[in-house]
Amino acid sequence: MVESLLEAVEAAEAAGISIGEYALRTEAAEGLRTREEVEAGLLRALEVMRSAVERGLKGDVHSVSGLVGGDAARMAASDGPLRDTPFTAAIAAALAVQEVNAAMGVIVAAPTAGGAGVLPGTLLGIAKYHGSSDGDLVRALATAGLVGGVVAVRASLSGAEGGCQAETGAAAGMAAAAGVEMLGGTPRQAMQAVALTMQGTLGLVCDPLGGLVEVPCVYRNATGAAMALAGIEMALAGVGFPIPVDEVIDTMGQIGREMDVRYRETAGGGLAATPTGRKLAKERLVQLKPRSK
Amino acid sequence: MVSLLDIIGPVMVGPSSSHTAGACRLGLIARALVGGTPERAKVELHGSFARTGVGHGTDRAIAGGLLGYQPDDERLRESLAAADAEGLAIAFENIKLRGEVHPNTTRITVWRGGKQAVLTGSSIGAGRILVTAIDGFPVDVTGNYTTLVLVAHDEPGIVAQVATALAAEHVNLATMRVSRRQKGGDAIHIYELDSPPQEGAIARILALKAVKTARVIERVA
């Protein structure tokens, strides 16, 4: 099992292969599934991601509370200075997936449902302008999986354990590496993209209104995709981050362990504890008791 | 072990991998312990499961798991009504479990055809789960493998006999663990298998004098 991204980079460089190819080979070598099974699983994930984006962009999905929905369609029709670029496409797609998720629709948890918009948003936003093949996207998803696996082992992927830095933050790191892989960057650039992205999400708290995956989660997936795009662009330009990627991930885990419980999905602090946050939670996200019958 | 498809997945009904998909998986394991849809279930919710479970569909997800729905099954949304229709009575209760307990933890007791089983399990992130107790015995079950759960009298040689029965059907063991509450009483054996055991292997195992029950938990996708 891969526990260090730096070791993964060295192994990929030694073998002269991309980091996505390394991830697929390593997974097959573990013996739980064949390479064909892994690729088929990732291709199915890609199809579900595409369907969720398409569904959300229609603009007619709404969460149970009615607090979120319709913003993906708004974003796709944006007329701002960055209109018709991978950037706006990524943000619209990230919002779309997360709106579908809040409406109890089918998505791919990548790594979690709360952070499920970041990876498809980033990759499909880029792919829209770069004509990437399914093969490119599958290798990119394998890259993201490798990064997520290391984060799971070294830190956490749970908002209840580590705050939002462990969900949308981890997702952004995964998406950054995946984007570099998809655009033909080197293994080392892919890992630089992870470090450059996750340094920017360190400390991010999990503070959902009423404890539900709606606000700010939907919007935080969009900003997560923006972080990933920043990391990708910097890494491909040759920017390096002075702290090695494994240490950035360890730092995320350490901050998570030291984070007050109010900021770990309990709705006890942050935006959830604002006057408006509390009011909306009370009015719209009624705290129900489990039903017995 | 963390697999790529654990991270890029599961494909699931939203909104929360911990509160919805993981909860569904725990329901599926409880169902497997009694070999099908229970007639009755008591679902106790701890921590974040208790506080935000209903808004995340945790109750619907566990009910769906008990009915045999997978985490990506859109019927999860309507599973409480389906449970009514299929004669599964579920009582939900919020509790505080003692000790160092993961925030997303449930204790599920199920009854079916005179059999009863109880599990304690946690949803540990990204839809992954860990069952920490079955029928009062401490265990570590992830659901990532086909899992054979045996309760047998605690005496020498049982593990070897079980391993032999599995080997005869070409079933390879990935991991195994035996635990007991007291020496010479009953012990629980957890075997994680690389492939599902055939009927023949289960029959051979059940024929062993010390073995009281043998239950198979299918790998949860």
Image (cartoon, coloured by chain):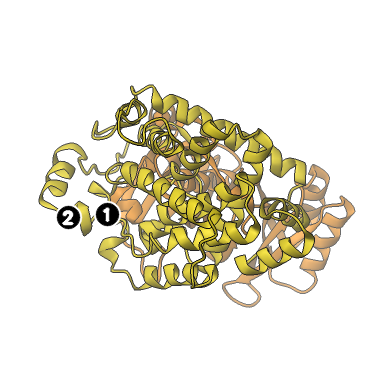
Chain colours: A yellow, B orange
Q: In screen coordinates, is A288 left or right of A264?
A: left
Q: Do callouts 1 and 2 mark residues in contact (Cβ within 8 Å)?
A: yes
Quadrant in the picture for residue A8 = bottom right
Residues B210 and B141: in front is B141
Is residue A268 shown above or below A140? below
Give the CA separation, mark 1 to mark 2. Answer: 8 Å
Which amino acid, by three-letter code, is at mark 2?
Ala
Query: Quarter of the image containing the C terminus of chain B?
Result: top right
Judging from the image, mark 1 belongs to the subunit labelled: A
Q: Answer yes or no: is residue B197 visible.
A: yes
Disc sitting over residue A194 in the figure: none
Q: Is residue A70 left or right of residue B203?
A: left
Identify which residue, A89 or B18, lies in the foreground: A89
Question: Are there few (<14), some (14-19), or many (20+) residues within 10 Å of tag 1?
Answer: many
**Up-down relation of residue A16 to residue B61 (above or below):** below
Disc 1 marks which residue?
Answer: A207
Mark identifier at residue A273: 2
Taking the view exactly as shown, the residue that stands out farthest to the right is B168
Q: Secondary structure at mark 1?
A: loop
Of residues B50 and A109, the one nearer the viewer is A109
Residue beneath the point at 58% across and 35% down: A46
* Viewer-side residue, A70 vs B67: A70
Which numbered disc flags the more N-terminal residue, 1 or 2?
1
Element at badge 2?
A: helix
Q: Position of residue B146 (x, y in %)?
A: 69, 50
